[in-house]
Image (cartoon, rainbow, N blue to C red):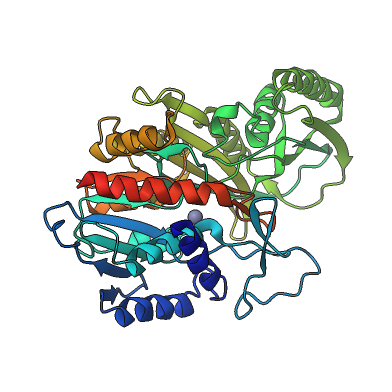
Amino acid sequence: MNEGKVIQFFREILRIPRESGHEEKIIEFLLEFGRSRNLETKRDAIGNVLITRPASAGCENWPTVVLQSHQDMVCEKNGGVEHDFAKDAIQAYVEDGWMKARGTTLGADDGIGIASELAILDDDTLQLGKIECLFTVSEETGLDGANAIEPGFFTGKILINLDSEDWGQLFIGCAGGIDTTANFKYFPTPMPEGLIATRFSVSGGVGGHSGDDIDKGRANAIRELARFLYETLDYDIELCWIDGGNKRNAIAREASAVVAFKEEDEDAIIDIFNRLGKEIESEYSITDPGLTFTAEPVEWKKDIIDTNTAYCLIAALNCAPHGVLAMSAEVKGLVETSSNLASVKMLEGDVIRVGSSQRSAVNSARKFAAQSFEACFALAGADVTHEGEYPGWKPDTKSPVLHATIESYRRLFGEEPIVRAIHAGLECGLFQGKYPDLDMISFGPTILGVHSPDERLELATVDKFWDLLIDVLQHLG
Ligand SMILES: [Zn+2]
């Protein structure tokens, strides 16, 4: 019955446009939903909505619980699909126990979280303590709603985040992050007479997400190219051009550099490249079987990077922290702190920019990782800045809401849930930054293929998710 209600509300949400940054219609819907049921309803300046369900008679002394989901969805569609996310309803259908959408993302991330909150707000027969239903905006594009939330917007000291996609797993922590950027100002210098140039490239790496995949031991194309450049410093080389990586939150899959040298050194430098290329390909034969080193002669007539800056850049790229820096002692197998050497780009204004990000669930450790990166590039003469910092959610295996949830799970399903933390950002980290004493947990039904038109929701797990949620709320009392 109740499971039907969650899906029924989800179907209603499928009709409401809610692309990140364009949440006007869903905000309006939520405000109307709360007010029409005479529930205390408010929104803040950025668009976060809070609807409060008063405690049922006899449950006034139960602790207030905040239930939280995000309003927005990732809007992706397959090529050739006619769909306007600004006004069209998502066309959902059910097949073999899974709900899917026709050619678009389904938005079960996090529409199912919204729907379960609405089901609780709508049903006053449920015996519950006071519940504050929080709906944040623009989670998918940068956790903006959670970032803008004011202390005091909600009052509960327990928060259940309904934005997880793996049924059977309870999430108790996430990493915070910071971006670190190093800018080298270089002197464009005419290409010296009599040198020849070659373009050296590293490509075919697997790459991946700088948080979730940082412990996979995959090649970083920038780092591997820099290793080669460092070995050429025994010769009179000039660096003409360099480029590598792209997104801050991705492991670099490709990098290239144009290097100039004397014709008489050509054989030696190509030998270094071939020998080191084979060695590195063998280091990564399991993780990056497609990793490839290629060299091709090029004509270079443009200005080059001055020798001193080139040396400093190459040295710094060789010592900058990249990869896992520490594992968690609290949660086995969890990366606690890491750094991602993400990109190197030549920009207008004679600037070479190195982009990176550092992550940790422990705020002091994240700060130190960013400082290590900064120190390395500051020594090399670059200007270093930090931006976009957000706090982590440090796992607490003694958390009362975790223990209540484990007990409910055992009682209902006769088995043990998996307790996990992730090495990527969640809104919970930002809540903990504003509400340091908040006791939090995150769980949800199984959703596969999130953020793509393959997104699908396993309906049987929605049922179990609902039962767990209600049981936890009733036992927290
Ligand atoms: Zn989500």
Q: Quadrant of residue 145?
A: bottom left
Residue 216 drawn above or below residue 24: above
Q: Is residue 463 left or right of residue 99?
A: left
Q: Which of 462 and 437 lies nearest the eye of the viewer? A: 462
**Residue 323 placement (x, y as % from top left):** 53, 30
**Residue 128 placement (x, y as % from top left):** 24, 56
At x 50%, y 75%, the residue is 22
Q: Is residue 11 left or right of residue 366?
A: right
Residue 389 drawn above or below residue 271: below
Residue 350 drawn above or below residue 276: below
Q: Is residue 86 left or right of residue 426?
A: right
**Residue 4 placement (x, y as % from top left):** 50, 61
Q: Is residue 183 visible?
A: no
Q: Is residue 416 left or right of residue 150?
A: right
Q: Quadrant of residue 55?
A: bottom left
Q: Which of 112 and 346 lies nearest the eye of the viewer? A: 112
Q: Which of 389 and 429 lies nearest the eye of the viewer? A: 429
**Residue 38 placement (x, y as % from top left):** 26, 79
Residue 238 drawn above or below residue 268: below
At x 53%, y 31%, the residue is 322
Q: Residue furthest left?
A: 61
Q: Is residue 400 visible?
A: yes
At x 79%, y 31%, the residue is 290
At x 42%, y 45%, the residue is 443
The image shows a total of numbered marks equal to: 0
